[in-house]
Amino acid sequence: MLSDVLKKHFGNGQWNRPMVAFWIVFHLVLIGIPLFLYPIKINTDLYSVLPASHELHKVSEAERTLSSKTTSQFYVLVGHENFETAKKASEILYAAIKEDHSLDTVRLYVDPSSMQEIQNFLFAHRYQMQGPEMVRQLEKGEVDRISSDALSSVYGAFQFSSLDNLAKDPFLLGENSLNRYLSSSLFSSLAFGIKENVLVASDSGVQYVMLSGSLAPHVSAIAKEGHIIGRINELCAKMEKETPGLRLAFSGVPFHSYESSSNAQNEVMIISIISMLAIIVLFILVFRSPIPLVMVIGYIFVAGLTALCCTLWAFKEIHIFTFVFGTSLIGICIDYSVHFFMDWKSSQENKTGFDVRAHIFKGVILGFLTTEAGYLAVMLAPFPLLKQMALFSFAGLLSSLLTIMIIFPNLKLPTVEKRIVPLKAADILLKVYSRIFALKRPAWICIWIVAIAVIISGLMRLNMENDIRGLYSMSDHLKKSEQLAARVMNLGTSGWFFIISGKSPEDVLQREERLCSRLDAEKEKGQLSSYMATTLFVPSLATQNHTYSLIREKLLPSSQNQLTQLGFGTAENEKFLADFSAASKAMVTMDSKLPSNLGPMLNTLWLGKIDGVYYSAVLPLHAKDQMVFKKMASEMDSVYFVDKMTDIGNELTRLSHIALGLVILAYALVLVLLSFVYGFRTAFRIIRTPLLACIIAASLLGHLGIPYNFFAIVGAILTLSIGIDYSLFFKENAKTMRTTMLAVLLSVVTTLLSFGALGLSSFAPVSTFGLSVLFGISFCFFLAPFNGTRPQK
Amino acid sequence: MPKGFLFSFLGFVFLGVSFAGSVYDFPLNAENRPVLEKSFSILAAHNVTRGHFKQTKTITRISRTFISEGTFVIADGNGIIWDTQKPFPSTLVITSDKIVQKTPQGKNSTLDASDNAAFREFSNTIQAVFSGKPSALYSQFNIFFSVQGNQWKLGLIPKEEVVRSIISSIELNGDLTLNSVLIKDGNQDLTRYEFSAHKYSEDLEPKEKDAFGRP
């Protein structure tokens, strides 16, 4: 059956067997090996799209480790005016997901003994863990004050800690340590209290019960059937419907990644369907034969598969956005096939498909080389996602060229009488161009003046900022949810934080303590309310030893007196001294058994050893002037201020400049290449078309108020790569201007449909990229006939 | 004999018998709730209540008793000032948004309760206990109440297990004034407050305003 089909449509008795074998081996290697070696892994992490900040290359791995810890965490706040209803709903949700293997942790209930556990921990290490204020008093020798304060507390009212251990702790160092924890840690701004063993916060008369969790490391945030986030969303929607007055708030990266990947998948589907439908309709209308359509679908499938597998081979994974951008490959691949089939279906002179190839060879090869040069240039940009997209397109286009040049020529030609294409649209366009070309000089001068004025005013309005906060626009539902969660939880975390590095854990902890002491000073000035740091619970050994020594030197000589004032005798003092001596070994390290409910927090803050260097993070809470903290970090050794959003914005701007520089370099090479073929003057005319088109597109984006950011510049790069093809086709096929115009028109329409669809994307980078290419390609098409080979009537 | 009188008499006998036992034998119910609210409304009749207190802390495990005394100010809408004078002076100021502890030696520790639910709850509970506002107690405690003549006893057991691990129970005794409070902590240690020399006024004195941070 297959051989019958092949015989019917292929052959002409001229199969170029070595080349076909090469085509088969080429695709088998590029598709087969990656599929055999690597599973198809799709990365949907929103953050991994973004480059590591240039400023932070030294700590980028540590920053990624912190991100990976925090980006898997999520919170669901279940609220109702009636606490019992809120708690019941949260218990239903908890019961539904607590055993789920997709989740690493799920927490609803709070262990009532957790506070006691912290208290016991602080008491056990009271000789090592004292705050800066107590250390300062000890250093100054203010023993009387410490002693009196302890006595005042014993005889004063309402204590948080028990006096059961008074004989062991006559100076109340354990209570002092607890008070420091209560007032200076995250606890001091905790909006949640414990009610019936769950965490509850109140906002506008609604009681919110908190359920927290984290995705298991093996679970991707990609939206798919039965995904845990999808199930949580569904269950919550059902509960909201069934329980009047129930209010739910979702917070955490998994919800955003799920939603954005779900949108991306839908968009990929819509963009692909629109592109394919447009191709089908246009091909049937123009070629009136199923053969070009079937061939092109197969050819795009092979090109897409090659692109996917090459990307997998090089990157071991493919990002979901490479898929979204990659759908534009369809539009580019089609250009070459359109030129092939236009000649195949219209030229009366061809005897075989190889004659068709000969006719289009120069134009397609030059177009291919210039486009691939653009992709190669983008591949040099130091941004993994861009490299991935460029490689995806580069490989796909290479496959498509090989198919056009090796497989398509074996296709039998239609009979001579069937070699007709509808040229009406081309004729109308040619007529329009003829009229434009016929315009008198004063009219041209007017057009130039108006065009230049409009272009310049648009360029002057261009906003070239790369603010990544504006790139991701969450849905209204999720936005309201995050706002509510932020208000209720009132954590006060900023988008920035500190990363501290060191050669050993002790080195990191000592540096962190120096930073904390600066933060304490700023806290006094009201610059922040608190901060989260590892050293609040695990001070450096140097500090612990120093504190222990100070207590031994300053307090121990007064212990008998203190105990006497409290009604104890010498026996208790001896026990106290023995206990103190034994406590010299009670140093806290990262390996010590720490209170269980501090585990998740310390696990997030302590980043551990990465590539031979140790790291920790310090998170300021309710901080005000960012510049104060940035300056603070700049003055300290191995302390890095990480403002991911701003740094990435700056990095994107830097990358934009690099990418643009690379493309200009590639264009200079293309100019040299084309100068050898056509001479400098003609070569310049060919490349000026896409250059001008990019300038006009940028101006239009300026008029529309769309930022000319990194993604718009990537669009311009693609415009330069693709747009030059149109100039080349007009240049190469000046003798067959009607079919060339039709071929270019068909190419442009399919390309514009792909990028136009991207322009409709809800994800701002995709939309900006799509619009940039849409405008650029449109102007390329409009300007291409002006490249020196004017269409004739 | 009028029926109402008979019921009152029976109720009196019943409550009288009950008063002889532990207050925790008598949960608050629809019958004795109005009596409780009436008793507390007398306590809350004045904006500012001042007086003298004697605090006795009994720590069973170490067999020690610590006795101190001083003055207190309970100001409706402002908070409580607990001024311990003997044997070691210290001042504790509890408002709805902070808990401040001061000593003459210069210790000044502040717990900000404005953003912290646990501190806020502690602060509000302490104020509710001492200022005669039972409505604020219903949600947080299982309440027990008994009365004999004009003498009443109020027993509070925290509903939350986590709070019970710190405060096991609170017992208030009073008549027209709050006379004593007995707090049993999680370790079953007792702190007894005995109040005397109650004075009432409608306004705060300037130094009290300062302590509360009021203009």
Image (cartoon, coloured by chain):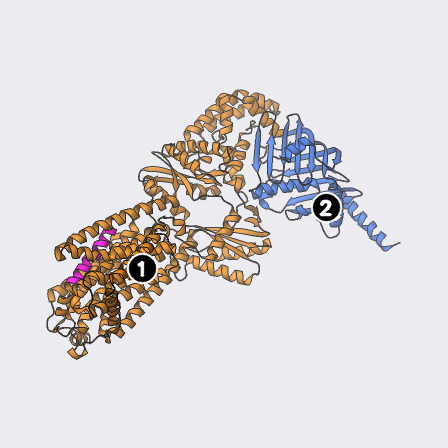
Chain colours: A orange, B blue
Q: Is residue A707 magenta?
A: no
Quarter of the image containing the C terminus of chain B?
A: top right
Disc assigned to residue B33:
none
Q: Which residue is mark 1?
A: A775
Quarter of the image containing the N terminus of chain B?
A: bottom right
Q: Secondary structure at mark 2?
A: strand
Magenta residues, start to end: A362-380
Q: Toward the viewer: A765 or A34?
A: A765
Q: Toward the viewer: A575 or A33?
A: A33
Spatial separation of the CA atoms under disc 2 and disc 1: 80 Å
Question: Given the image, what chain letter belongs to the residue carrying mark 1?
Answer: A
Image spot of residue A588 (x, y percent): 44, 33
Q: Return the residue found at the far right.
A: B1
Q: Which residue is mark 2?
A: B145
Q: Do marks 2 and 1 share a subunit?
A: no
Q: Nearer the viewer, mark 2 or mark 1?
A: 1
The amino acid pointed to by label 2 is Phe
Identity of the residue drawn at 25% across and 48% down: A661
- The answer to whether marks 2 and 1 mark residues whose Cβ atoms lie closer than 8 Å is no
The amino acid pointed to by label 1 is Phe
Image spot of residue B78 (x, y percent): 66, 39
Image spot of residue A773 (x, y percent): 30, 58
Q: Secondary structure at mark 1?
A: helix
